[in-house]
Every structure is written in C-alpha cells, then in structure tokens.
Image (spheres, rainbow, N blue to C red):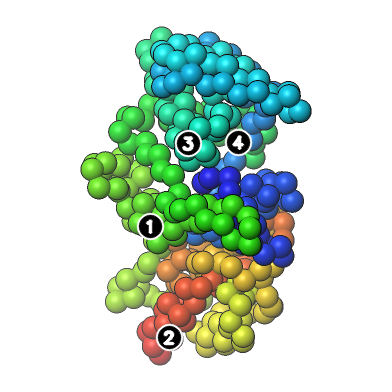
Amino acid sequence: IPRDTRVQLPKRGWEKIAHAYAYGGVELLRETVVNYLGMPINYYVLVNYDTFPSIVDLIGGVEVDVPKRMVYNDYSGKLFINIQKGLQVLDGKNALHYVRFRHDALGDIGRVKRQQDFIKAVLAKLQSPYMIPKIPDLANKAIELVNSDMTPAQGLQLASYLVSMPSENIHFFTMPGKAAYISNISYWVGDITAASALLTGVPEGHGTVSGDVAKEETDTGTLDLSTTDVPALISSINTPVAVLNGAGVSGLGKTMATALQKIGIDVTHVGNARHFDYRTTTIHLPEQTTDPVAETGKTLAELLSVNPRLISRTSNVSHATIIIGKDHALVLKRLEELAEKKQ
C-alpha cells in the first residue's frame, strides 16, 4: 500500500495512510488497513532504520540487480545514497538505501516495486539449500531485532513455513489506483474494487495457490441452512453479545439487535463503533477472552456468514461484539433467513 494512499483514519477523517502510524502506532495502522481492505491483519513485524540493516547483515547481504545508478543527497536529513548499477550483494546499509530511494520518475510506486523485488530476493536467498539449515538460528536472532506481536515460537514456525513454500505460491500486489491532487495535497487514490478482486481470488496467469491458502480463501464461514440444526447452534451461544454500528446508518445498531434477539441471541449492549468506515461486518472479542466467549464469536461468524479471518481480539470490548459494516443489508438478510429456519 503506497504511503500516500488516501484513507479514512478513525476520528481524523481523510489522511495519508502513512499518518496512521504517526498518530496511533501499530494498532491504529492495523485498524486502518483492516477497514480499508476488509481483511484481517493477523500479526505485524515492525523494523526501523537501525534494525533493517542488521537483519540484512545477519543473512550475509542480499543479491540485487540494480537497474540504474541511484544517487540522492539529503543534507538536512543526513541521507546520502550512492548505489552503482548492476548485479551486486547489498549489505545492510546499502539495502536500506535501495528500499528507501524514490527519486526517479516513478516516485513512491517505483519504490514499492523495488521493495517487493528486494523481499523476493531475500526469500530466494533463504530458500537456497545452504541457508535452510540456518533458518531456526536466523529466525531466533531476527525476532530479537524486531517488534512484533508474534511469540518467538510463532515467528519460527511462520519463517519455516515461508521458506518451504514454492515461490510461485507467493504473490505480490501494489494497491491499484492513480495519483491525484485533492485540496492541494498529493494522494494515491486506491481502487478498492480492483484490489478486492486481487485479494479474494487468484490473479489471471498466476496459477493456483497452495491447498491450505486456497481453503482459507474460500472458507467464508457460510452455513448450509438446509442441513444445519439452526436452533441448536443458536442455543449454543451462552454469553451475551454487543452490537456496534460501524456503517453510520441511523438506527442500524438497534435494527441489528432486534433481529438477533428475534432468533434468541441475548444482546447486552448497542452503540456506535469508534468510526463509521467499516467496509465489512467484523467480530471483536476481548483480548483476554474465555473459551465460551471465543466459541460465541466463532458461532456468530458462522451464523452471520462473517469470514472467520475477520474475528479479532482487542482490548476495546468486553463481550463478543458484532461491528456492523457497509455490508449490513446482506447480514440482515441472513438474519431473516435464520429466523425463518428457526420457526
């Protein structure tokens, strides 16, 4: 996602996405991306100008074919880039310069492409036979250099999974869109429709993804009502539920709560979400959740056809909480079908 992408930040309105981290750190950035793309962010890994070079040096540098000489001098920012054209192994310092450089005709979009090419080169090196035995040690050392909400065990597991995945199963995309000036500010205006097509299916010419990924993409949590014991499933929900209006439609929270109560679900709270730009309905669970509450969240996702990947944990709620998005018409229709099935 280009740093100048125009998005709505909760309580701040339209801004560049780069401002999300400046205003609210990782959590605001995560929330902004989830709402913008309608997809969950399961984990984050945060590097900075100090740790990025250290990680590159940890793996012995990265081989990159630099397409043209890169020269840029910023005396006030103390940034001096001078990388020669051609195939070479970039150490940590020059690798950082390579992924930061954007002073050419393509600007930030060109930089995004170089960053993607660099990540591909890193993955190619890690997948080489002489590097694979070193992965556990490298992963443990790298985890110490970054900030992340993954445990060391999760980091090692995901690193091992990634380096064993065929390269053709790893896809890179740049947010489709166009540059625009709005109120005398330069933005990248994303094409959400085109982005959704990329993110929810396999792009033309890219073949199929691995079985695990394909299953995850197609498993939306939708129940076949003709074969499901709906009354029993609803009865299994034994913890109260909260409903928050995340679409900004007047009275939507109350309408949703009434529909839930009609099928026998106890709604303990109705209110507004922190902002009204939720594209899709999501389910939030308390950060320190109990097994019954977790099961309630899972069952709600099944009943309402919410993708299970859109269930997340947060410190902002105290009950299993449905945040109604701009797909509210589909969710309400689903509740009508459940009410008919329960009769």
Kindly state the secondary structure of the residue where label 1 is placed. Answer: helix
Would you say residue 115 is visible in this rendering? yes
Query: Could you say which is closer to the camera, residue 122 or residue 317?
Result: 122
Q: Disc 4 designates what residue?
A: 45
Question: Disc 1 residue type?
Answer: Ala
Mark closer to the chain start, 4 or 3 = 4
C-alpha gap between disc 2 and disc 3 = 54 Å
Q: Quadrant of residue 177?
A: bottom left
**Residue occupying image coordinates x 51% and y 73%:** 326
Q: Disc 3 designates what residue?
A: 105
Check whether the beta carbons of the residues at disc 1 and disc 2 lie within 8 A of each other.
Answer: no
Question: Which numbered dot is residue 336?
Answer: 2
Placement of 71 over or under 191, stated as above or below: above
Question: Disc 4 residue type?
Answer: Val
Question: Disc 3 residue type?
Answer: Ala
Check whether the beta carbons of the residues at disc 4 and disc 3 lie within 8 A of each other.
Answer: no
Q: Is residue 133 left or right of residue 285?
A: left
Question: Disc 2 residue type?
Answer: Glu
Placement of 86 over or under 237, stated as above or below: above
**Residue occupying image coordinates x 40% and y 39%:** 172
Q: Disc 1 designates what residue?
A: 194
